[in-house]
Image: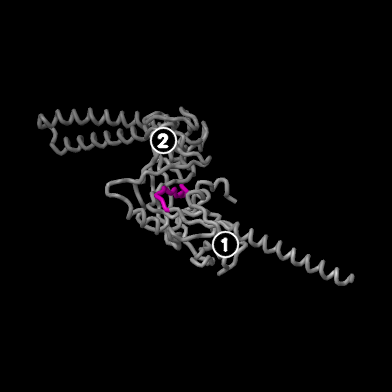
Amino acid sequence: MKRILMFISLCTLMLHTGCESKKEEKEEEVNFLVTSPVEKDTLVDKEYVAQIRAISHIELRALEKGYLQKIYVDEGQRVKQGQLMFQIMPMLYEAEQQKAQAEANFADVEYKNTKSLADSNIVSKNELAMAKAKLDKAKAELSLASVHLGFTKVKAPFNGMMDHFQVRLGSLVDEGDLLTTLSDNSKMWVYFNVPEAEYLNYQNGLKSNNKEVVKLKMANNELFGHSGVVETIEADFNNETGNIAFRATFPNPKGLLRHGETGSIIITTPLKNALIIPQKATFEVLEKKYVYVVDKDSKIQSREITIGAELPHVFLVQGGLKKDDKILLEGLRQVHENEKIHYKFMKPEAVISNLGLYAE
């Protein structure tokens, strides 16, 4: 009798457990959510690492040898075109100019006397020509001495900003020694590299006589306050990277940007009828993106997709999906290839609008 009661109890327990398992399985099947891509026009921001350069960035070097007698500017100072910046001790060059001036004066007097005699036919015209040549030579030497004296004063060739000094007051500088650098930051040239395929898309989408307007994201992840314009593209591709360099010009009225900074160029591209899906509806195998597509028999099939762009919580699909395809939204790790599932369809607009809440 005991054995019969134990057998009945065991059967009852197994029956109860089986019912519970079927109930849980049923609940699990119902919980699968399925949606479809959203088709809409959208804007895609593409970022490129950029190098920021001043439109003019030059080295100021000594044109004459001598001791650095005076420095009229300071590091980081803004200077104006023609402003005196450095003075190399000029005494030697002043003396050379005075000597050349005296020789020019002597040659001028000699020429005038010779001319007076030649006019009276006392000396020949050849002697007059020799005196004239001597005067011209003396004037040329005076001009050369004046140029050398002028080289002792180093002036700003354009409006710009000083960099740090390479020499100090009293230093003996030689001809060609670097004194400092000067940058014209009124406008900035921003260089960035573009892959070949994107270059071709850019050229095909560019309207005649129009220039692409771009934005600059600075190193602190804030957008620069002025937009720039792509003005030029280099002639050749880099064979090692497959990229070509673009150059955008940005106004810099407040001088915020400096030569040598880094940032990111942002190009905004409009996309017509783009297919948008949640990122969490995808999975990756060997660096390729896939989704589970639910067919008409409620069976799931993995399908490779091509991602055109990535936005917060969503992907823009470039290939592999159609607007009416149904894709598995959740439970991707709980299903297997060709498995038949029970699902609940969720409108794609509702899925996209709630991605901030549902994002995993």
- 167, 103: nearer the viewer: 167
Secondary element at tag 1:
loop
- 159, 345: nearer the viewer: 345
Mark 1 Cα-neighbour bin, 10 Å: few <14, some 14–19, many ≥20? some
Please indicate, yes or no, whether residue 29 appears anywhere in the rendered image: yes
Mark 2 Cα-neighbour bin, 10 Å: few <14, some 14–19, many ≥20? some
User: Pointer 2: what residue?
Assistant: 252
| In this rendering, the label closer to the viewer, 2 or 1 | 1
Magenta stretch in the rendered image: 39-50
- 162, 296: nearer the viewer: 296
Q: Is residue 327 above or below residue 174?
A: below
Q: Is residue 48 magenta?
A: yes
Q: Is residue 260 above or below residue 327?
A: above
Q: Is residue 121 magenta?
A: no
Q: Is residue 31 above or below residue 112?
A: below
- Residue at 87%, 72% in the rendered image: 3
- Residue 291 lies left or right of residue 252; in this view the side is right
Given contact means CB atoms under 8 Å apart, are the residues at marks 2 and 1 in contact? Answer: no
User: Pointer 1: what residue?
Assistant: 342
Residue 147: quadrant of the picture: top left
| Amino acid found under the numbered disc labelled 2 | Asn
- Residue at 17%, 37% in the rendered image: 129
